[in-house]
Image: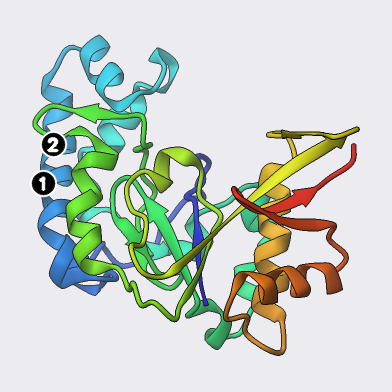
Amino acid sequence: MLILLPPSEGKASSAGGEPLDLGSLAFADALTERREALLDALERLPELPTAAAVKQLAVSKGQAGEVAVDAVLRGASAAPAAEVYSGVLYDRLGLSELSKKARRQVLIASALWGFVRPEDRIPYYRLSAKARLDGIGPLAAWWREALGEAMPDESNELIVDMRSAAYAAAWKPQRATLLAVGAFKQSGDKRKPVTHMAKAVRGEMARALLLAKAVPTDAVGAAEIARAAGFEVELSDSGLDVIVTD
């Protein structure tokens, strides 16, 4: 089993650590060239008028300071991704409390890095899937070919997908079983996706799967673990639907 997590919009400071080492990140052989090109593009942003720079970075005028932060990432101090990414999903998941064996089953999607492992050391940065940098274009398309070559994709593997649609667009397996996890509210015979609880649900679901004594090998096994952990779930065409109440 492999669990794919989204990055978090909010990130903790990485101050005080050793500088970023691109060669130490996951899939360095396949992804370093793409990462380097993105860092180059971010370094050029401060040369633009502020309005143009924040538009490319897809941030507000009040967040214009992020342009300068991203321009010096190569020399910025770094910390484990499990500590840098924060927010509801990561709070509910509690990566730091899990065993090394469990954390090896996790990859975190990123608009800047492609995918990183929880222990990969990265700096605080600001780059979402919505950004569109000169010379790069849409980030999902930018990553698609490289991730297709780098990512594990075996027919007997279960990949549990907690990513949002913007990050899922960058890579999907061709052979492995992909099980997307979504949060839904049931009203009569109608089921509607919910957003306000989705991050919490995905974090708790990922934790339950990673703490399970037996690693699930298929969608049915993942659903059984979820039910044993107290979730109301159903397998559907969309994946593993978690039924939530207010």
| Residue 167, image x, y percentages | 41, 45
Q: Which residue is mark 2?
A: 41
Where residue 138 appears, x then y in whole percent? 24, 32
Taking the image as shown, residue 214 lies to the left or right of residue 83, namely right
Q: Could one spot residue 140 in this view of the protein?
A: yes
Q: Judge by depth and name the residue closer to the eye, 240 or 62.
A: 240
Q: Quadrant of residue 239?
A: bottom right
Q: CA distance from mark 1 to mark 2?
A: 6 Å
Q: Looking at the image, do the residues carrying marks 1 and 2 touch, with CB atoms under 8 Å apart?
A: yes
Residue at image coords 18%, 53%: 145
In the rendered image, residue 142, in percent from the top left (x then y), is placed at: 19, 43
**Residue behind mark 1:** 37
Q: Is residue 135 found left or right of 88 in the rendered image?
A: left
Quadrant housing the C terminus: top right
Secondary structure under the numbered disc 1 in the rendered image: helix
**Left or right, residue 119 beside residue 1:** left
| Residue type for callout 2 | Ala
Q: Position of residue 99 (x, y in %)?
A: 60, 85
Which residue corresponds to the image point at 25% horizontal and 59% vertical from the top-left? 147
* Amino acid at the residue labelled 1: Ala
Give above or below for 188 relative to 179. above
Compare residues 102 and 218 and report the one nearer the observer.
218
Marks counted in the figure total: 2
Badge 2, how many Cα within 10 Å: few under 14, some, many 20+? some
How packed mark 1 is, by other alpha carbons closer than 10 Å (few <14, some 14-19, many 20 or more), is some
